Amino acid sequence: YTLSLHDALPIWPLIEPSVFDLKEEAVEPDAMLPTWHMRGSRLQHEGGVTCCAIFPDGRRAVTGCRDSTAAIWSTNDTHQILRLEGHVSAVLSCAICPQGDKVVTGAAGEGIIWDASDGSRLASLPGFSCCAPFPMGDRVLLGGLAIAGPGQKGAIYLNDGSLQVTLKAHSDRIMGCAVLDSGDLALTVSKDKEAILWTDGGDVKYTLRGHSAPIVACAVFPKKQIGRAQV
């Protein structure tokens, strides 16, 4: 899947070709290397797409847009299933709970938890720049909170919109966050060039230093193996 700040989000499913496809393309029988074709389609927004996420079943996707809306789409035929309206500024971040039943979207002024089945609004959150649901789907990690000055704070919120714990250790804006699949550790990365691994109770477990430039994104490997921060 690819994303750019255009009015549509291209989807490029990688399809493994059949023997017939290979013959049609005159591939030599003794050179049967793994090959894939890409068939493109687009999820059309009225404004520029800013973020996207794929549902666990792979059949739906959610996108956020500069026109202050988000939408849930079918990845099969790209029709819009639900339009999520309620933000008053550009949607900056979106995520899907692992169970696929809830969607989280964030803008500068407000975050919202949505019911993915009917698009109803379940809870309101502070505005944020990044988010990551916990594996059980009962909580969400937020980074770059709009209510925390320049966005240097993070927080863990319950799905009813109530604050569980505030994360206070970064000295500059949080740019990315992730939750380990065990659910007991969370990762945030910041423009302060540090990555911090937190317990789910909000305590700093490790501070990871070594980057020479602001860290803009992060990801974690399964089974608590390792975290990776990307400059």
Image: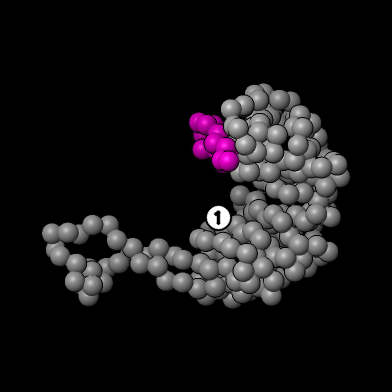
Camera-nearest residue between 85 and 149: 149
Q: Label 1: how many residues lie within 10 Å, few (<14), some (14-19) or many (20+)?
A: some
Q: Residue at x 30, y 67 (%)?
A: 17
Extreme residue in the left direction: 30
Q: Is residue 12 visible?
A: yes
The residue under label 1 is 56
Which of the 4 image quadrants contains residue 78? bottom right
Q: Can you see residue 189?
A: no
Q: Who's the residue at 15% across and 65% down the image?
A: 28
Q: Is residue 37 above or below residue 161?
A: below
Q: Disc 1 residue type?
A: Pro
Element type at mark 1: loop
Q: Residue furthest front?
A: 212
The answer to which quarter of the image holds residue 29 is bottom left
Indicate the quadrant containing the C terminus: top left, top right, bottom left or bottom right.
Answer: top right
**Residue 155, image x and y in percent?**
77, 39
Span highlighted in magenta in the image: 218-231
Position of residue 94 measured from the top left corner of the image (x, y, whole percent): 68, 55
User: In the image, is residue 133 above or below residue 226?
Assistant: below
